[in-house]
Image (spheres, rainbow, N blue to C red):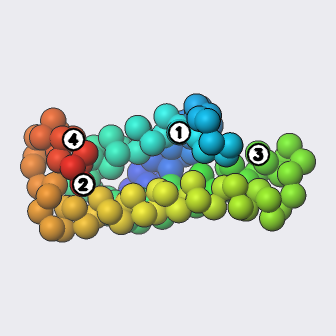
Amino acid sequence: MKKISKMLFIAAIVAITSQLYLNFIIDGFRVSTAVILFPILLITYSKELSSFWTGVVTGLMVFIVRISILLIRGSSLISSFAIVYPASMFYVIYGLKFKICIITGIIVSRNINSMWSKTNIC
């Protein structure tokens, strides 16, 4: 139960911070502060939580929060889904990629600074 609570905590923090973002030249492409925060939280909790399942829970939470906001603003369900789906899948894929990096030994250090530099390689 503690693991689920921690995953939900990470997902909630990421979902909230995903609303703080920068728009770039390409319409619809934005980079949020959650993209920076998510790997930090994965590294912090890497010994306790599965990064893949944390990515799945986070992706679902981001999906629910973002689609809710778009629907409240009056967007259609289909257009909201098309906008939100790629961002949600990012967290699932990132969690899986992080897990693969741990399994293959790319990220095995107990030193947080070393893990951070190895995460950038991954």
Q: CA distance from mark 2 to mark 3?
A: 32 Å
Q: CA distance from mark 1 to mark 2?
A: 19 Å
Res. 16 in view = no
Q: Residues within 10 Å of mark 3 (few under 14, many from 20)?
A: some
Question: Which disc number belongs to residue 31?
Answer: 1
Question: Which disc number belongs to residue 122?
Answer: 2
Res. 79 in view = yes
Rendered location of residue 61, percent (x, y) = 59, 55
Tell me the amino acid under the disc marked 3.
Ile
Q: Residues within 10 Å of mark 4 (few under 14, many from 20)?
A: some
Dot 2 or dot 4: first in sequence order is 4
Question: Which disc number belongs to residue 116?
Answer: 4
**Residue contact between numbered discs 1 and 2, judged by CB atoms under 8 Å:** no
Q: Which residue is mark 3?
A: 69
Dot 3 or dot 1: first in sequence order is 1
Q: What residue is drawn where x is 35% and y is 45%?
A: 39
Tell me the amino acid under the disc marked 1.
Val
Dot 2 or dot 3: first in sequence order is 3
Instruction: Say whether residue 121 is left or right of residue 27.
Output: left
